[in-house]
Structure formats: structure tokens, C-alpha cells
Amino acid sequence: ENELAFAGLSGDVQKDTFDLPKKIDADLIEHIEKFNEKRNSLIDSEISYSGFKDFDNIIGGFKKNDFVIIGARPGMGKTELMLNMLLNNISTSRKNVLYFSLEMNKTQTLNKLLSYEAEVPYAKINSGALKKSEWKSFEKNIETLKKLPLFIDDTASINLYDLIAKCKQMKQEHNVNLVYIDSLQLITLTEKERRKASSKNVLNVVSAALKDLIKTEDISIIATSQLSRS
């Protein structure tokens, strides 16, 4: 009784001023409005698409904080698939993208991208033996690629923590929110880090660190990983 009296004096308790439950239709309208706002903001800012319609329908696109691994045996076209996804994604979303090309150097990567964009065989671009019509298409697509918000890092055998530091810096300076890595097996650990990891598989250590990066930096990572032939 005393507690109620004090509460009454402070104006916290008044008769007949409870928030009574609303009928479901009013709740539902409010809920749908909030849901629609969230859906639109997701469409605009948090979902990226691979450009492969059936695949995107199955997974619903790449969402913020996703860690997607493309796993396949050697020679199955993991890099080709990833680069096509990257081009499709960047041309529709215009998001800033960081690509770690650990399998190929920058020249090879640029030639691959030009090959896809210009629809000219990679071997021809690599050798420079282009017909006049192919050269025109090539020139046109150079201009298209120049405008893409794409950053390529081809540091060979990059250390895990150097890679993480670069991701953080690129997020801070260029608002990069989508990172492609080709491939996880080529990320290295120092001797000290290897000893620290002890019995853990190196790939598990790399994956765990990248998952932490995704959470802290609010980015998505798409990576390739090589499976054994067996």
C-alpha cells in the first residue's frame, strides 16, 4: 500500500490509463509497414546478386554478413564462376568490391575480366592476337571496366592478418562491403600463428578469423576453396 501511495504521488500510477491490446488488424498493418520498410532497405543495401537467376532464387542472393564458400575439385572453373559472379554483382549493385586474386597475378585477372566483358577468348587476349572487330569490342569494354568500383589485390601467399588488415582499411577508406577471395588455401599463417593454432586445421583458423571479420566490419565474403579429387 505504501509503495502504491508513493507511486501515486510521483504520478507513475493513474487509474484507467493502461495501454490496452489492439485488435489484430491494427497490429498487422503496423507490422506489415515495418516489414516492407525492412524489405526495401534490404533490397537496396544488404543483398547482392550473382547474376545467375536460378542460383539467386535458391539462396536469395548474398546477404550482409554472409560467408559463402565455392568448393570444387581442381580445374572445375571456381575462379571463372567467381569472376562472373563478381562482374554481374558489381554491374547491378555498384557496391565497392575488393578482390583478392591469390591464384593469378593482376595482369591475368584483368585479361580474364576483359575476356568475359568483351566476349573474346582469353587465349587471344593473353597473346594479343585480336581481329579488328574483336579489338573494337575490347576497347569498348575497357571503358566499362574502368568505371567499376573494383579493387584488386594480387599479393602472393598473403598472410591472414595482413589480409584482414587490408579489408578493414578498405572498409574504412572506400566503404568496401563485399570481399571476394580466390582461394582460401593460398592464405598463409606465420610460424608463430601456426604454433598458436596447434592441432587445428589451417583452413579452420582462416575461416574462424574471417567470420570474426564479417561480424566486426559488417561485410560479406565470398571465397573459393579447393576440394581433393577424391
Image (cartoon, rainbow, N blue to C red):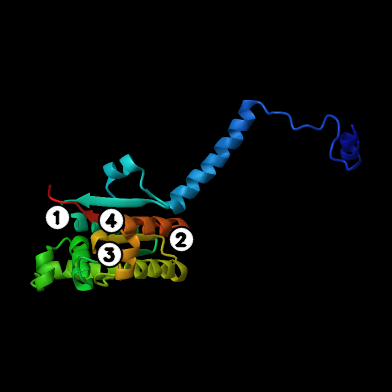
Q: Nearer the viewer, residue 148 or 55?
A: 55
Q: How crowded is mark 1: few (under 14 residues within 10 Å), some or many (20 or more)?
A: few
208 horizontally vs 21: left or right: left
Q: Nearer the viewer, residue 126 or 77?
A: 77
Q: Mark 2 points at which residue?
A: 217
Q: Residue 141's quadrant in the figure?
A: bottom left
Query: Judging from the image, what secondary structure is the residue with disc 4 in?
Result: loop
Q: Percent position (x, y) of residue 48?
A: 37, 52
Q: Do the residues labelled 3 and 4 touch (CB within 8 Å)?
A: no
Residue type (three-letter) at the residue carrying disc 4: Asn
218 horizontally vs 112: left or right: right
Q: Residue 99's quadrant in the figure?
A: bottom left
Residue type (three-letter) at the residue carrying disc 1: Pro
**Residue at x-position 30% and y-position 64%:** 194
| Cα–Cα span, label 1 and label 2 | 31 Å
User: Of callouts 1 and 2, which one flags the residue occurring earlier in the amino acid sequence?
Assistant: 1
Q: Which mark is residue 201?
A: 4
Q: Residue 74 carries which label?
A: 1
Q: Name the residue under label 3.
A: 187
Residue type (three-letter) at the residue carrying disc 2: Glu
Query: Judging from the image, what secondary structure is the residue with disc 1 in?
Result: loop
Q: Percent position (x, y) of residue 125?
A: 13, 69
**Residue at x-position 29% and y-position 51%:** 69
User: Of callouts 3 and 1, which one flags the residue occurring earlier in the amino acid sequence?
Assistant: 1
Query: Judging from the image, what secondary structure is the residue with disc 3 in?
Result: loop
Q: Nearer the viewer, mark 2 or mark 3?
A: 3
Q: Nearer the viewer, mark 3 or mark 4?
A: 4
